[in-house]
Image (tube, rainbow, N blue to C red):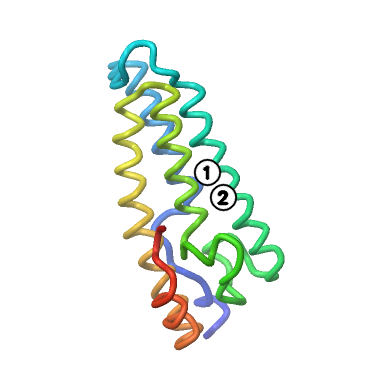
Amino acid sequence: MPAEKDHADVLVPPPVALALSVAAAWLADRLWPAPFLPPGFPRWPAGGVVIALGLAIALAAIVQFRRAGTAVRPDRPSRAVLTTGPYRWSRNPIYLAMLLVVAGLAVALDSLWQLAALAVLYGVLRWGVVAREEAYLERKFGAAYRDYARRVRRWI
């Protein structure tokens, strides 16, 4: 592969998609609050656990990238198909972690807007990022990636 083409052609950098979706939902919630949880629900403890789980998964996945000596960013070349750590259970643990963080925020903030942001973020990640990354990884790694994709689910 030519160096200038040796990366996934993602629609938007995933951290940007995350930040924009959370910020838009936060702003919408400030303008038109839309709670969904019953009064007295332990929003922050419950949401905090989900957020912490997401952050732990992301950290574990990033450690695997570092150990493999490959780039975390999808606009950089991949040097390996990761199959250890959280990549044993999910082909996209960092994106799964992002979705968990937004779900945790939805609970902690009691915001239907954050749930809507979760749905939008899922769509952007699934079709604007993951589909493009999968096509790139299959082109670059061929049978090794196809075998991995057959063994490990896309999300969980």
Residue ID at (39%, 38%): 21
User: x and y percent of residue 116 in the render?
Assistant: 29, 35
User: x and y percent of residue 61 in the render?
Assistant: 60, 57
Q: Which residue is mark 2?
A: 57
Q: Which residue is mark 1?
A: 54
**Which SS class for mark 1?**
helix
Q: Nearer the viewer, residue 46 or 117?
A: 46
Quarter-wise, where is residue 128 in the image? bottom left
Up-down: is 82 above or below 90? below
Quarter-wise, where is residue 10 in the image? bottom left
Q: Which quadrant is the C terminus positioned in?
A: bottom left
Q: Amino acid at mark 1?
A: Gly
Up-down: is 111 above or below 56? above
Left or right for 58, reference 89? right
Residue contact between numbered discs 2 and 1, judged by CB atoms under 8 Å: yes
Q: Nearer the viewer, residue 120 or 67?
A: 67
Quarter-wise, where is residue 70 in the image? bottom right
Q: Nearer the viewer, residue 112 or 44?
A: 44
Left or right for 68, reference 51? right
**Which SS class for mark 2?**
helix
Rounded to the nearest whole Å, what is the CA distance between mark 2 and mark 1? 5 Å
User: x and y percent of residue 150 in the render?
Assistant: 39, 77
Q: Amino acid at mark 2?
A: Ile
Residue ID at (34%, 49%): 122
